Image (tube, rainbow, N blue to C red):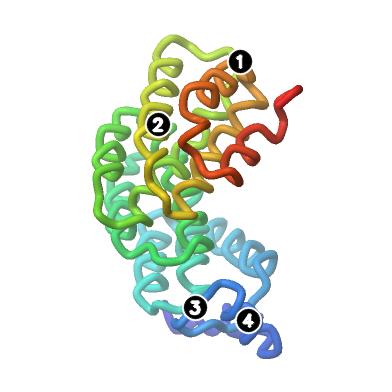
């Protein structure tokens, strides 16, 4: 099954884009040069034609090729809100986290992870352990995968508690000088500011002085009088 689907992905490649994409994404792995919209359309057709078990098997196989677009396609295959009996998908997504080494691949995988967290918020206990990882990409994933809680309106008490929990993780990251970590903090707060400007302003008042300037600017992008 892998060969057939991988051939379909490779057929969408624009070799003239491959070198440019590899440079932009700082990739040492193989890059085919497939535009993201094309990958999205292809994986959508796969999701419609394959069973969940087949999709999980294909996603695992695509990921294991270590081809840039194949890993993105693997994540897209599993990005779905409603998945009945999703424990195997959750386990597979968790297995990928220690291999994150590129923001594009990580962000697509985190989109899939976010759906599974929303399906079962108790899984935040697992994600909290990521915040203590010695790998930057794993720590970053804890914020990127929990972005849905930054975007919620009219939160129920349980989701309010979860939001505060995640903001606690963000606060613990403030002393980390890594650009990607600081960017993730700013991203989370920027999205939060569209739904709870007061909470964002309070976070910045307390922790903003410890953030890098670009991250503070990102966080305050949509705040009035920021």
Q: Tag 1: Cα neighbours inside 10 Å, few (<14), some, or many (≥20)?
A: few
Front of the two marks 2 and 4: 2
Q: Quadrant of the N terminus?
A: bottom left
Earlier along the polypeptide chain: callout 4 or callout 1?
4
Element type at marker 2? helix
Left or right of 128: which side holds 207? right
Q: Please report the residue visible at 61 percent of the width from the left and 74 percent of the height from the top.
A: 24
**Whole-Å distance between the Cαs marked 2 and 4?**
38 Å
25 shown above or below 171: below
In this view of the protein, which residue sits in the foreground, 106 or 137?
137
Residue at the far top in the pictured view: 157
Which numbered disc covers residue 198? 1
**Whole-Å distance between the Cαs marked 3 and 1?**
39 Å
Front of the two marks 2 and 3: 2
Residue under numbered circle 3:
27
Q: How many marks?
A: 4
Residue at the far right in the pictured view: 224
Earlier along the polypeptide chain: callout 4 or callout 3?
3
Residue 100: x %, y % from top left: 38, 62
Front of the two marks 4 and 1: 1
Q: State yes or no: discs 3 and 1 in contact (Cβ < 8 Å).
A: no
Residue under numbered circle 4:
33
Q: Please report the residue visible at 39 percent of the width from the left and 14 percent of the height from the top.
A: 158
15 shown above or below 224: below
Residue 197: x %, y % from top left: 64, 20
Q: Please report the residue visible at 59 percent of the width from the left and 80 percent of the height from the top.
A: 23
Residue under numbered circle 2:
171
Earlier along the polypeptide chain: callout 2 or callout 4?
4
Residue 204: x %, y % from top left: 54, 26
């Amino acid at each position: 099954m892998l060969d057939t689907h991988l051939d379909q992905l490779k057929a969408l490649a624009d070799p003239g884009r491959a070198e440019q994409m590899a440079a932009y994404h700082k990739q040492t792995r193989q890059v085919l040069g497939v535009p993201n919209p094309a990958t999205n359309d292809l994986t959508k057709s796969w999701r419609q034609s394959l069973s969940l078990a087949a999709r999980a098997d294909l996603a695992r196989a695509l990921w294991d090729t270590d081809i840039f677009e194949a890993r993105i396609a693997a994540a897209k295959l599993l990005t779905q809100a409603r998945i009945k009996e999703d424990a195997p998908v959750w386990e597979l997504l968790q297995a990928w986290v220690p291999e994150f080494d590129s923001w594009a691949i990580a962000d697509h995988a985190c989109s899939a992870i976010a759906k599974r967290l929303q399906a079962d918020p108790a899984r935040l206990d697992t994600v909290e352990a990521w915040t203590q990882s010695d790998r930057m990409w794993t720590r970053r994933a804890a914020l990127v995968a929990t972005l849905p809680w930054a975007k919620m309106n009219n939160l129920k008490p349980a989701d309010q508690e979860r939001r505060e929990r995640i903001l606690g993780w963000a606060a613990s990251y403030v002393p980390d000088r890594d650009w990607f970590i600081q960017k993730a903090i700013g991203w989370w707060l920027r999205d939060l500011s569209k739904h709870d400007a007061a909470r964002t302003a309070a976070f910045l008042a307390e922790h903003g002085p410890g953030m890098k300037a670009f991250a503070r600017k990102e966080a305050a992008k949509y705040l009035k009088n920021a």
